[in-house]
């Protein structure tokens, strides 16, 4: 073992360094049918009024309010997409269907339930209110209204309003292209039988899921051996089309830990050790062409916790999200959380509801090799470095992974 040359830095400092050095990606246009989950890059302004014509809210009769209480002649029909031609005179009514254009001359719609029909005549009640039962031009959107703002995530309603205002394509931030690889001579492809001393590569699949969930387009690169030349070959190939390199393993100070020296030789390492448990050897580097590289530790829990603490916020920044961090919610500790003297610890917890409160229970042994401590966890509880720890009953802010 050799001593590490990298200073041990605080987790918040490391997270800030990562975000500072992570670029926001460029803009592309996508069809509304492919826009779900993307982040809007520019404000969208309504070009036309919505509705674009006075539109009936009900099935009934379009009339003049001044004709209240009278028996009127039915002059025609205005169905959705098939307007009544011409203007409506006094003493006349037009049958109208929901979404039909209210004819010129009419100023209200009477619901079909409220009229009496006899042949070509209809008797309407009194009094009638001008403006009743239809949506005025521009009632929902006026031209020039900002309907969606840059930084908004496009969900069903946002996509719906964009399409309603006639926008087929939307400017969104590009998704980060991430090259993902594992490192380690002990790793075999999942599904093949491990020989003596070998284990399945699980990080690649866990991180593939995490990256997909964070909005990345992933190129899967396989398992690089613990050999400097081969590793360099993998990384060089990976960087061709990628914005981001994510590796797991090979970042601690053992002799087989080759990722840091490699990143140093092709870029600048800004973070090499963090006062974080799990995840002390987390590594972050910038490379030529505005690319960034994350060297995640090999222990499965460490790789996923450092993903949440550092990589996800960076991917969100690249995509233009206004909110980079996961939601923090106050929870009550249901256990005594022991602290680590010199490192901030992210403990994995399940949450349950107790009245108005969320109560956090530990998932058991917090060993960084024990993926079961993260499986099924709802949140990460941050326990500050020190001697004291946090007693059961303490209210803390938890980083929510999923709510129960
Ligand atoms: P390293 O960071 O390479 O020293 O690895 C630390 C520990 O994590 C070792 O026990 C490795 O076998 C394990 N490990 C590294 N990479 C993976 C992986 N892709 N899948 C599962 N375990 C891994
Ligand atoms: Mg290794």
Image (cartoon, helix red, strand yellow):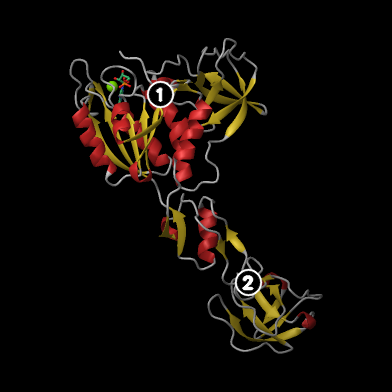
Task: Bin the neighbour count of mark 1 within 10 Å (Cα to Cα): few under 14, some 14-19, many 20 and up.
Answer: many
Check the image and report above or below for 101 versus 44. Answer: below
**Is there any visible trace of residue 200 in the rendered image?**
yes
How far across and how far down the image is residue 314, in percent?
A: 45, 39
How far across and how far down the image is residue 78, in percent?
A: 59, 80
Check the image and report above or below for 29 versus 191. Answer: below
How far across and how far down the image is residue 354, in percent?
A: 64, 24
Residue at image point 47% right, 15% down: 364
Residue at image point 60% right, 11% down: 388
Residue at image point 65% right, 18% down: 394
Asked whether mark 2 lies closer than 8 Å to ligand 1, one says no
Q: Helix, strand or loop at disc 1? A: helix
Looking at the rendering, in which quadrant would you find the C terminus?
Answer: top right
Check the image and report above or below for 174 versus 254. Answer: below
Q: Are marks 2 and 1 in contact (CB under 8 Å)?
A: no
Looking at the rendering, in which quadrant would you find the N terminus?
Answer: top left
From the image, tell me which residue sits under label 2.
59
Quadrant of res 133: bottom right
Q: Earlier in the sequence, mark 2 or mark 1?
A: 2
Label annotation for residue 302: 1
Q: Nearer the viewer, mark 2 or mark 1?
A: 1
Between residue 391 and residue 316, name the one nearer to us.
Answer: 316
Residue 126 in the figure: left or right of residue 180: right
């Amino acid at each position: 073992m050799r001593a590490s040359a990298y200073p041990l830095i605080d987790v918040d400092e490391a997270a800030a360094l990562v975000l500072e050095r992570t670029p926001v990606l460029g803009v592309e246009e996508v069809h509304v049918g492919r826009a779900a989950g993307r982040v809007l890059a520019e404000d969208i302004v309504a070009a036309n009024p919505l509705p674009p014509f006075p539109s009936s809210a009900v099935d009934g009769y379009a009339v003049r309010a001044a004709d209240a209480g009278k028996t009127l002649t039915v002059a025609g029909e205005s169905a959705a997409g098939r307007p009544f031609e011409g203007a409506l005179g006094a003493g006349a009514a037009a049958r109208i269907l929901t979404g039909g254009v209210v004819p010129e001359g009419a100023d209200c719609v009477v619901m079909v339930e409220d009229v009496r029909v006899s042949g070509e005549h209809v008797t309407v009640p009194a009094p009638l209110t001008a403006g009743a039962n239809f949506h005025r031009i521009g009632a929902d959107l006026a031209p020039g209204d900002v309907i969606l703002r840059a930084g908004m995530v496009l969900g069903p309603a946002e996509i719906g309003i964009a399409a309603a205002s006639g926008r087929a394509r939307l400017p969104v931030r590009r998704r980060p292209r991430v090259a993902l690889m594992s490192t380690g001579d002990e790793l075999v492809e999942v599904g093949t039988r491990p020989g003596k001393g070998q284990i399945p590569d699980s990080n690649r699949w866990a991180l593939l899921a995490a990256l997909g969930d964070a909005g990345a387009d992933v190129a899967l690169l396989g398992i690089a051996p613990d050999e400097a030349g081969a590793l360099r070959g993998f990384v060089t190939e990976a960087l061709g089309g990628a914005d981001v390199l994510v590796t797991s393993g090979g970042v601690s100070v053992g002799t087989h830990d080759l990722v840091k020296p490699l990143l140093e030789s092709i870029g600048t390492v800004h973070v090499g050790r963090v006062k974080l448990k799990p995840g002390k050897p987390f590594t972050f580097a910038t490379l030529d062409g505005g690319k960034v590289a994350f060297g995640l530790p090999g222990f499965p829990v460490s790789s996923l916790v450092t993903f949440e603490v550092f990589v996800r916020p960076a991917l969100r920044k690249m995509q233009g999200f206004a909110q980079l961090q996961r939601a923090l919610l106050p929870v009550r500790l249901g256990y005594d959380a022991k602290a680590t003297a010199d490192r901030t610890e992210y403990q994995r917890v399940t949450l349950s509801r107790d009245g108005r409160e969320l109560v956090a229970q530990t998932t058991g042994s917090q060993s960084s090799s024990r993926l079961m401590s993260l499986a099924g966890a709802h949140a990460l509880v941050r326990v500050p470095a020190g001697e004291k720890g946090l007693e059961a009953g303490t209210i803390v802010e938890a980083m929510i992974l999923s709510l129960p």
